[in-house]
Each structure stands twice: as structure tokens, then as C-alpha cells.
Amino acid sequence: MIVSRILDAILTVFLVLCLVFVAMRVLPGDPAVSALGEYATPEQLAQFRQRFGLDVPLWQQFINFFVSLATLDLGTSLISGQPISEILLVNLPYTLELSVVAMIVGMLLGVPIGVLSATRRGSPADYVARVVALAGFCIPDFFLGALILIVFGLKLDLFPVMGGGSGFFERMSHIVLPALTLGLIMAAFTSRLTRSALLEVLRRDYIRTARAKGVEERWVIYRHALRNALIPVVTGFGIYILTMLSGSIAIELIFARPGVGSVLVNGIASRDYPMVQAGLLVFALFVVLVNFAMDMLYVLIDPRLRR
């Protein structure tokens, strides 16, 4: 199973890179003009294209790109002239820490709220939880981010609103509001998914049998029902990460955070082909690794899948 998953991951990343390579060349705009300005002479533009290999046919650019990638060379930014690996090493930790903290917030809030809503079905608590979760679905991430920024950052002045910080404690203070924005949206998704999955499990025969034997209710919920209900939750959690990645790009822009999302947006705007290709490679690898981790979690949650 592991070998097939690895082969699927390699094929997925390859197809993503092929699509990005073609899409960037189809978009209007000349990277040489973006880098040198519209007043650059034809000779300067020609030298620029020759320096970065943009004067050769597309099929040759395609081969050169994958040959460089095979040697772990991500290329050089067309705009700044810096090695892309150095740019990503500076910005990647900010995106990873935002994603990880947001996922933790989403799970710590979403799963307990979903359990509470399912175990108290039809109660005021269930009604409030469902309304809040529905509101989390309806509110766009960029709007919620701007709202949180204004209320907790500008009005109440509780946390910094711009930048990523330098030291550990400063970075943690800068990540609170962006992670809260993504985490609340993920909590809304997770709570609804947990509620639906848990209600389905609670109707099964072995749950009725456990209750008939006099097993304490909390053990019925947390030991027997919740573990089986977590399988669809983990599945939906892995799928939602794709949405969260696109949301992290918007959140990085709203809070002016450094990160791969900001680098990617700037690269698209300036037609920085190598930067966009490398940035999307990072996102593709992240998605593939998360999906692989979800597959491994299935086995831990449900031992029957090991067979």
C-alpha cells in the first residue's frame, strides 16, 4: 500500500508541475518586461531572456526545468535574482506554522463542538452549534480575517496585525489572529462533519448493545462511538486542507505575513516563472504528504484496515 501511495504522489506532483508550466506560459505578459520595465531596450530584453533560458523553445524549457528539478535546483528568481531555494527557506516556516496552528485550533474546537451537538441533539446547545457552524461556512475567509484584524488588532489592540515577527514569542503573537481566522473556519467544517458521523455511529447495533449492558454513557461516546466516527472526519479533514491552503494565501496577504502564499502571488503578478513553479511545487508536496498522513491515520483509527 505504501509503495502505491508513493507512486501516486509522484505522478500527482508531476502532473501539477506540467499544468503549472503550461499555464504560466499561456498567461499574457512578458517576464523580461516585468523584470526590466517597459522602457528596457530590445537588446536588454534579449540578454535577459538568454540569461534565464527564455529564448529557447518551450519543449526545451520544459526539459531544462525537470532536469534542474532532478538535481534539486529550483532555479533563480527572474525578478530578484536570488536562488529560489533561499527565498523558500525563509518564507516556508511562516506558512507551515500558520497551517499547523490553524489545524490544531480547528480540531480542538471543531471535534468537541461536534460531539456536544450530536450527544445533545435537538437541545439549545445543538441549535447554537449548528447555527455557528453554518455561519462559518458562509463567511469568506478574507472577510473573517479582515473582521478579526479590525476587532482584535486595531480596536482592542490585543495582538499585532502585520508581519510575521522574528523571535519565538514575537512570532507566536503575530500568528494568533491569522491562525484564529483559518482555525474558526476549519472548526465550523469539522464540527458539522463530527456531528453527522457521530449521529450515524450512535444508531448502530453495537452502541445499543453497550448501553443495554450498562456501560457508562461517556465510555459509550468516547471509547466506542467517537473512534469509529473519526474515520470520515479524518477523510474530510484531509480534503479541507486543500481549501485551507488557498485560504492561507489570502490570510497572508491580509495580515501582510511572509510566506509561500505571498511569494506565489507576487510571482504570478510579475510573471516570475521559476518562482511560481517552485511555490506550487511546495503546495503540491504539502497536499500529497497530508493525504499520505491521512491514509496512515486510517490504519491507526481502524485496525481492520490493516488487513
Image (tube, rainbow, N blue to C red):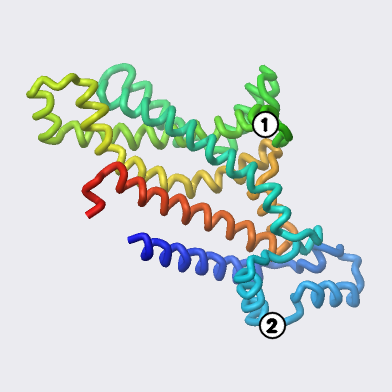
Q: Quadrant of residue 200?
A: top left
**Would residue 34 be found to the left or right of residue 280 on screen?**
right
Labelled disc at residue 48: none
Residue 296 location in percent, x, y?
Answer: 36, 50
Residue 98 location in percent, x, y?
Answer: 58, 38
Residue 168 location in percent, x, y?
Answer: 67, 31
As shown in the figure, which amino acid type bears the numbered disc 2?
Pro
Residue at figure coordinates x 35%, y 46% from the top left: 297
**Is 167 located above or below residue 21 in the figure?**
above
Residue at figure coordinates x 83%, y 72% from the top left: 48
The residue tagged 1 is: 168
**Where is the C terminus found, in terms of image quarters?**
bottom left
Query: Mark 2 touching mark 1, by CB under 8 A?
Result: no
**Would residue 195 be found to the left or right of residue 184 on screen?**
left
**Is 246 located above or below residue 151 in the figure?**
below
Whole-number angstrom distance, CA of label 2 to CA of label 1: 47 Å
Q: Quadrant of residue 187?
A: top left
**Where is the N terminus found, in terms of image quarters?**
bottom left
Number of other residues with Cα within 10 Å of mark 2, as a class: few under 14, some 14 to 19, many 20 or more: few
Image mark count: 2
Q: Element under label 2?
A: loop
- Residue closer to the observer: 297 or 119: 297
Residue 103 location in percent, x, y?
Answer: 49, 37
**Is 178 located above or below residue 94 in the figure?**
above
As shown in the figure, which amino acid type bears the numbered disc 1?
Phe
Q: Nearer the viewer, mark 2 or mark 1?
A: 1
**Would residue 16 be found to the left or right of residue 85 on screen?**
left
Residue at figure coordinates x 82%, y 66% from the top left: 33
The residue tagged 2 is: 57
**Would residue 138 be found to the left or right of residue 199 on screen?**
right
Number of other residues with Cα within 10 Å of mark 1, as a class: few under 14, some 14 to 19, many 20 or more: few
Q: Element under label 1?
A: helix
